Image: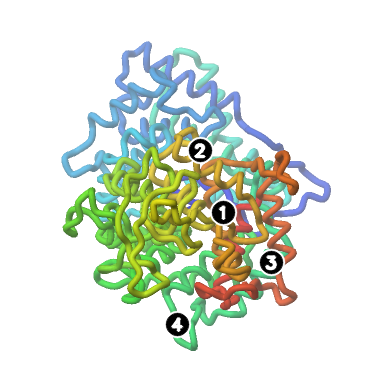
Amino acid sequence: MKRILSGALVLSAWLPAALPAQTGGPVRSTGAIFRSEVDGLVRQLRDTARTADLPALGGDSVAATAKILTAMGHCHRRYHISDGPVVRPSLQFLIRHRAADGSFGAVDATAWVVEALRVIDPDGYRDEVREAEAWLAAKGQTRPVFAPMVTALLERVRSDQFPEHFGRDAAIQAKGWIQGGAAPLPREQAADVLVQLVACQAANRALDQAQDPAPGAAVWSPAQQKAFDWLLAQQKSGVFAVRGQADAGLTGFGLLALQTKPKAARSADEQKVVETGLRWLLAQQRDDGTFSEHLPNYVTSVVVAALARWDDPAVKPALLKAQRAILGFQNAEAGGYQRSDRDYGSIGYGGAQRGDLSNLHFALEALRATELPADHEAFAKALVFLQRTQNLKSVNDFTGKVPDPEREGVILDATSGDDGGAAYYPGNSAAGYLVQPDGKSVPRSYGTMTYALLKAYTLSGLKADDPRIQAAVRWIQQNWTLDANPGSDPALGEKARFQGLYYYYMVLAQALDLVGVEQIKAPTADGKGTTTVAWRQALRSKLEAEQDAAGSWVNDQNGRWMESVPLLCTCYAMVALELCR
């Protein structure tokens, strides 16, 4: 899934390419610097606002109030809407100053309000933020305003100069106001000082993270670098090709995989390749928002995943255009579908093709990456289809005749099973079928689609304690393996167990990471008990063991679904490894 949310402060994006080594001389302070100054200034701003009955922490200034709230949201206290009266009056003050066109006054003030609303209450003011951003874009302002301050500080870091030095003057000013007690407080100046101190805190956190990654932080291993080098050798000017022809889909996957290497760790030449390729992708967007006439939904969803990681201002309009295209692919009322139709809520490869769970999970991920609101009707409609792919009788209402995809002229009388796993689309499974005594066929649940279901359910808003999620997790625990794509009918032969194996690894990692599962309680080899598996470490070990000497991966046991192509399998493996923290 997308790893960066627009407007969020992603520390890895701030880190300098090479941090200065500390070998003697000044030693950088770690942790939250300027705590007392930030705490004291926030307290002073609040106390004086209440005493003077001011409408907001910034007095009657929209810009100052927004800066103060932004700083509070990013400081060591992480203020949030849940802090109630500490932030609520100031938020209400900002909203009262919202103009009919979505702005909050001048460009600078509006940009800071967007930052404040995002960090203090990211869910509560989604519409206001979206309209303000559209207004800013029309004015040529598309970049955030707080993150560049942090970046600028990091660029100044030297072996004897650190954020604690850069904020020294601001700290002196803050102490003076704090010690001044009830003296008049210059609120706009105080807002700038507070923002500067918190930017220093954020820069220092970024340096802490680079120096000592927190538990669970991404690890860039020698195996990943080897794969990165191999993948880099396959591209030309950032573009990947199929049979000599530049291909948007494979370029999207290739650039997504290359971007799993933290930006701060990439060399200038590596970054140039990535950005050149991303610019090429942007240029491929068609008038309808897609990036290819062939398999438009699949290709567009993959390209969105690659572009969403890039911080170039040109990306956002392209993502919104792609969002509209993907929404147009959903099989819903606009296309003549009714809820009773098997494919209602689904998304397929694009055009008139029937929907399937594989395309749908890619599409839902892309929609979330383009910041489609979580309460958008597209997710509720998707849930209707998702339930019909799950072998869970309590939610799956599908039963009916479907063509057998493998045998021409054969019609299956399909119904749902009840093991909690998932199939490709209602009534259809690439893993075979279980024929009931009454002649009805249950599509077999299998690994890739069960993980795709878990991922899609989570993207659509279901929580980990939802019975549908829990049923899918139970199937995963009961069928846990990294040696094959589980669930295939033994009658299909040994080779069938390995179809889609590297796709399986990728979607396994994405789903378990997204839903928050860290350990799998799997059956022991003798089937008499259970064992606990730390899946991230297990998957990393498996992939590193399967990597070839050149640095790539290929499915040499079953090349179905293009897994005979090392480029695709290597992209799948790299996306999975990024999540094996």
| Residue 139 visible in rendering | no
Q: Residue at x 32, y 18 (%)?
A: 54
In the foreground, 73 or 192 = 73
Q: Amino acid at mark 1?
A: Leu
Going by the numbered disc 2, the residue's amino acid type is: Gln
Q: Secondary structure beneath disc 1?
A: helix
Q: Position of residue 441 (x, y in %)?
A: 41, 56
Residue 214: where, in percent of width, then height? 68, 42
Residue 396, picture quadrant: top left
Q: Which label number is shown at residue 246?
A: 4
**Alpha-carbon neighbours of circle 2 within 10 Å: few (<14), some, or many (≥20)?**
some
Q: Secondary structure at mark 3?
A: helix
Nearer mark to the viewer, of 3 and 1: 1
Disc with the residue nearer the chain's start (3 vs 1): 3
Residue type indicated by callout 3: Gln
Q: Position of residue 520 (x, y in %)?
A: 64, 43
Q: Which residue is mark 1?
A: 508
Callout 1 environment at 10 Å: few (<14), some (14 to 19), or many (20+)? many
Image vertical order of residue 487 relative to residue 165, above or below: below
Q: Residue at x 27, y 45 (%)?
A: 377
Horizontal and vertical percent position of residue 288: 25, 68
To which quarter of the image does residue 518 belong?
top right
Q: Label 4 to label 1, Cα distance in Å? A: 29 Å
Residue placed under numbered mark 2 in the picture: 470
Characterize the local packing of mark 3: few (<14), some (14-19) or many (20 or more) Cα atoms within 10 angstroms. Answer: some
Looking at the rendered structure, which numbered label has been put on residue 225? 3
Q: Nearer the viewer, residue 171 or 489?
A: 489
